[in-house]
Amino acid sequence: MSGMTTRHGPAKGIGRWLFSTNHKDIGTMYLVFSLVMFFVGGAMAMVIRSELAIPGLQFVHPEFYNSMTTMHALIMIFGGVMPAFVGLANWMIPLMIGAPDMALPRMNNWSFWILPVAFGILLSTLLMPGGAPAGGWTMYPPLVLQTGDAFPYLIFSIHLMGISSIMGAINVIVTIINMRAPDMTLLKMPMFVWTWLITAYLLIAVMPVLAGAVTMLLTDQFFGTSFFLAAGGGDPVMFQHIFWFFGHPEVYIMILPAFGVVSEIIPTFSRKKLFGHDSMVYAAASIAFLSFIVWAHHMFTVGMPLSGQLFFMFATMLIAVPTGVKVFNWVATMWRGAMTFETPMLFSLAFVFLFTIGGFSGLMLAAAPADIQYHDTYFVVAHFHYVLVPGSIFAIMAAVYYWLPKWTGHMYNETLGKTHFWASTIFVNLTFFPMHFLGLAGMPRRIPDYSTQFTDFNTVASIGAIGFGLSQLIFVLVIVTAWKGSKATDRVWEGSHGLEWTVPSPAPYHTFETPPKARIANEAFE
Amino acid sequence: MTTHTEDRYYVPHGSHWPIVGSAGLLLLMVGVSSWLNGGDAGFYVMMAGVAVIIFMITGWFANVIGESQAGLYNLQVDHSFRQGMFWFIFSEIMFFAAFFGALFYARNMSIPWLGGSSNNFFTNLLLWQGYESTWPTNGPGGVGGEYEAMPPFGLPLINTVLLLTSSITITIAHHSLLAGKRAPLAIFLAATFLLGFTFVYLQGVEYVEAYEHMNLKLTSGIYGSTFYMLTGFHGMHVTIGAIMLTVIFFRVLKGHFTREKHFAFEAVAWYWHFVDVVWIGLYVFVYWM
């Protein structure tokens, strides 16, 4: 219980949030923001699935449908998943490494407060002449250049999201490298901290590249440059290369922190140490490295030299090796453990199983000759939703259930939590599993209508989607009612270990103002 | 426990600068966007945004400089700033990498393909008959019309010498600071930012020359696009760097920085070297080769 002297409490009123330099407050704001965006993006998914429930056009105009797919993706990626993980990082990294706060607290505030501006601008495009962006979140030219008044707003909102992410990532790296408790060496760091360190590096490396790519779109549109214009010596395909040089690492930006979360939770509820901690670190680093040299597997059908196709195919398949190491280690951690199945553990187990399904369909897509068949079909939609929804989002939910007692000081309602878990898991599979079959049968993505042969699976998927959407209301109920739950102990979970469990629940406004000894936490476990 | 001691990591008690910055960004981005869409009022909104951001930067830095002079920052805080600056510069390098990537892709991939290389025989035959791939080029469509390419020897070479010299002068200034010699520190720092501003001025002269006499414009196909975007963003960074050097210069005159603690000085020096290295890449790949 070292370093508990309270310097001062939170400020009063709205100023507490507007001017905050406290990692816990900022983490809370990130998490609440991402929850709001999760529902905004989710509402758009409901529009999409309602339209696709039966063949024909029933509810929306095709262009608005295209806006919905585009905005759904942008909001879920940049507003839902990424801020949720940054929120978890803000809350947990200082607690896990024994730091008084994030290394650069004022910049931390700015990283967050840029986000509402960015998404305010992005969402306002829904009301503009020409509608919201509808060319897909990948913003390929020349299609994206047909966007109406929304175009510059789209570009600048992407810039703002990038600035926010880069500042957040710099803060995470500096905090981890510079603020650890004295005897916490790098390889003693919890896996969540490790995966975030690697993620932050990826963010700083690729978000500026995205900024460059969209800047070129902007100048092509308004200032007459020829980056993506063949007549001027440029190439629209060049945009795809630059975009996916960002886009593929971005995929791992959204999954590596999820790996970290699951690597924290499975040991706790297996009451064993994480199997192969160091190999997990090397696997995450290998995945990060490989993420830079596989981007063109998103563009196998666009035209590239055969040598390029072969290189990107084999490099992509190589990722299965470190990912396999991770899945193996999670399973090995559970092997002969004294397992219990509280809600965070349930979400983590579902993560391991369902993420692996997404991984396998990824391997199928990695094979260039097969991808030519699968490209731009619902098989791709099934694949990336399996890694993102029961992957990233389940990990975020697992993390919220796992750490909510530490944040609020109260236990959530376990029955409600388990109801939320089972409803989510059943409906998520009902939504996305049939999409594999639709894709293999040839249904293209990003189209509001389809041939009648695809009706049955689409109806099932739409029922699943509505069910999944409604299930998330239980999640909100769990969070709201958690403030009235039974008092949580400091340790919260019987098998938990690590510095975050040595501080009281709820965690005081200021923690570790003088550095703790990491040994205390390790001994607690051994 | 209200006073901060050097042995404790300094965590500020809240700050209103970030939210001011966000408001500035909102005005800036909305202003630029509506201006680009043809709304005249957008320009004024944009300028208001710029003003708010300048106000924010000035206030935020004044705040930090004040805290630094008050001795609130211990060595660990200093390390945080250093590492933060390092990663910021890394992100800037990756931003330039996107534009260098575009340049290399155009020169090695898209232009040869338009000329019919690899398996693109029919692209050339059917779409761009008679186009031969060369560099520099404004593409098979001759976008922007006839132009002259910027020769590497002349103003660009003078600019290279200026920037390389400024890298030496900032290093001399740094060594003077470490040796505790304040006069040469100030003199060489002044020399550095003067060289920097001269570079920016000459770059402006070069642009005027290109626009008025060589018909080399931003719209001159892929050559004009890469030329102006790379040199333009670089010039913007030189301007920012030179302004930061000026700020550091006046701080030196006020007696700031010690032999042991001078993060801001080093951060600006790193930034200046970064700008210098990018220029070498530019000079080699944009002007020369």
Image: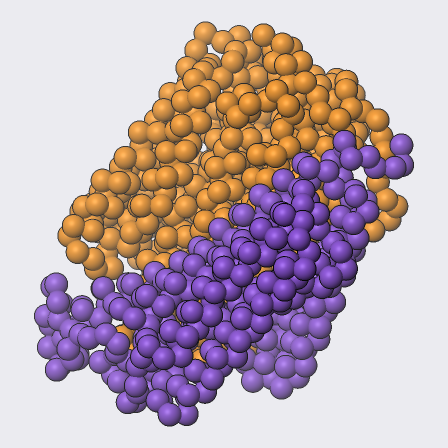
In the picture, measured across the screen, residue A490 lies left or right of residue A318, that is right
* Most foreground residue, B52 or B69: B69
* Most foreground residue, B144 or A129: B144
Image quarter (top left, top right, bottom left or bottom right) of the C terminus of chain A? top right
Residue A389 location (% of width, % of height): 48, 40
Q: How many marks?
A: 0
Residue B174 location (% of width, % of height): 59, 53
The image shows residue A290, relative to residue B140, as above or below, that is above
Residue A262 location (% of width, % of height): 51, 27
Residue A29 location (% of width, % of height): 70, 45
Its colouring scheme is by chain
Q: Can residue A420 be spotted in the picture?
A: no
Q: Kindly identify the residue that appears in the image at 28 percent across and 54 percent down.
A: A299
In the picture, measured across the screen, residue B70 lies left or right of residue A470, that is right
Q: Can residue B278 be spotted in the picture?
A: yes
- Label the purple chain with its letter: B
The image shows residue A126, relative to residue A477, as above or below, that is below
Q: Kindly identify the residue that appears in the image at 43 percent across and 82 percent down.
A: B206
